[in-house]
C-alpha cells in the first residue's frame, strides 16, 4: 500500500497531472481567500470585544504565535520543530491573505505589497509596547 502511495505521489508532477495539480492549488487558494474575506467581514461586523485586555490579547496573538514558532524552530527538534514551522507558515499565510485583501479593497498592487512590512512593523511595535508596559508595572 505504501509503495502504491509513493508511485501515485511521483505521478503528481508528470505533465498529464500537473495541470490538475495547478487547478487544485488555484481553487484551494481561491477558497481560502474567500473564507478569509468572509471571516474578516464577520469579525468586523459582529464581534465587539468589551474588555480592553481581551482586545489586546487578540491583537497580540498572530505575532506571538510567529515568535513562539521561531523559538520552536531554533530550539526544538523533530515534531517540535515541525510545529514551529507550522506556526510561522500560518503567520505568513495570514500576512499574505491580509495583503491580498488590502490590494483588492484598494484596487492597488502597491498597497498590497506595502501591507506585509506595515503589518509586521505594527505588530512588532505593539508587542514591544506591551512588553514595555509589563516591565514598567502599569
Image (cartoon, rainbow, N blue to C red):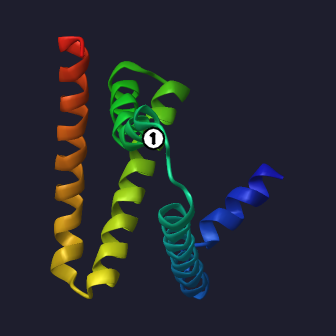
Identify the residue at the far right of this view: 1
Position of the C terminus, as image quadrant, is top left
Element class at badge 1 = helix
Residue 104 at x, y = what percent? 34, 83
Q: From the viewer's perspective, tell me whether residue 64 is left or right of residue 128.
A: right
Above or below — where is 92 with respect to 34? above
Q: From the viewer's perspective, tell me whether residue 55 is left or right of residue 21.
A: left
Q: Check disc 1: other Cα within 10 Å, few if <14, some if 14-19, many if 20+.
A: many
Residue that appears at 49% across and 73% down? 37
Above or below — where is 128 with respect to 24? above
Residue 51 at x, y = what percent? 47, 37
Residue that appears at 57% across and 78% down? 21
Residue that appears at 40% across and 67% down? 97
Residue 66 appears in which quarter of the rendering? Answer: top left
Residue 26 at x, y = what percent? 51, 80
Residue that appears at 36% across and 38% down? 60
Question: In terms of depth relative to the viewer, which is nearer, 77 or 115?
Answer: 115
Question: In terms of depth relative to the viewer, which is nearer, 126 or 85?
Answer: 126
Q: From the viewer's perspective, tell me whether residue 12 is left or right of residue 138.
A: right
Q: Which residue is mark 1?
A: 87
Amino acid at each position: 500500500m505504501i509503495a502504491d502511495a509513493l508511485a501515485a505521489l511521483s505521478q503528481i508532477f508528470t505533465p498529464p497531472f500537473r495541470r490538475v495539480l495547478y487547478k487544485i492549488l488555484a481553487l484551494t487558494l481561491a477558497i481560502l481567500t474567500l473564507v478569509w474575506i468572509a471571516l474578516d467581514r464577520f469579525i468586523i461586523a459582529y464581534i465587539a470585544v468589551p474588555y480592553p485586555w481581551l482586545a489586546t490579547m487578540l491583537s497580540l496573538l498572530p505575532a506571538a504565535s510567529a515568535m513562539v514558532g521561531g523559538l520552536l524552530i531554533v530550539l526544538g527538534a523533530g515534531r517540535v520543530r515541525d510545529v514551529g514551522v507550522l506556526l510561522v507558515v500560518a503567520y505568513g499565510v495570514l500576512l499574505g491573505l491580509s495583503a491580498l485583501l488590502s490590494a483588492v479593497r484598494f484596487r492597488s498592487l502597491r498597497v498590497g505589497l506595502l501591507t506585509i512590512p506595515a503589518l509586521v512593523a505594527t505588530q512588532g511595535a505593539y508587542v514591544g509596547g506591551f512588553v514595555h508596559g509589563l516591565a514598567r508595572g502599569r
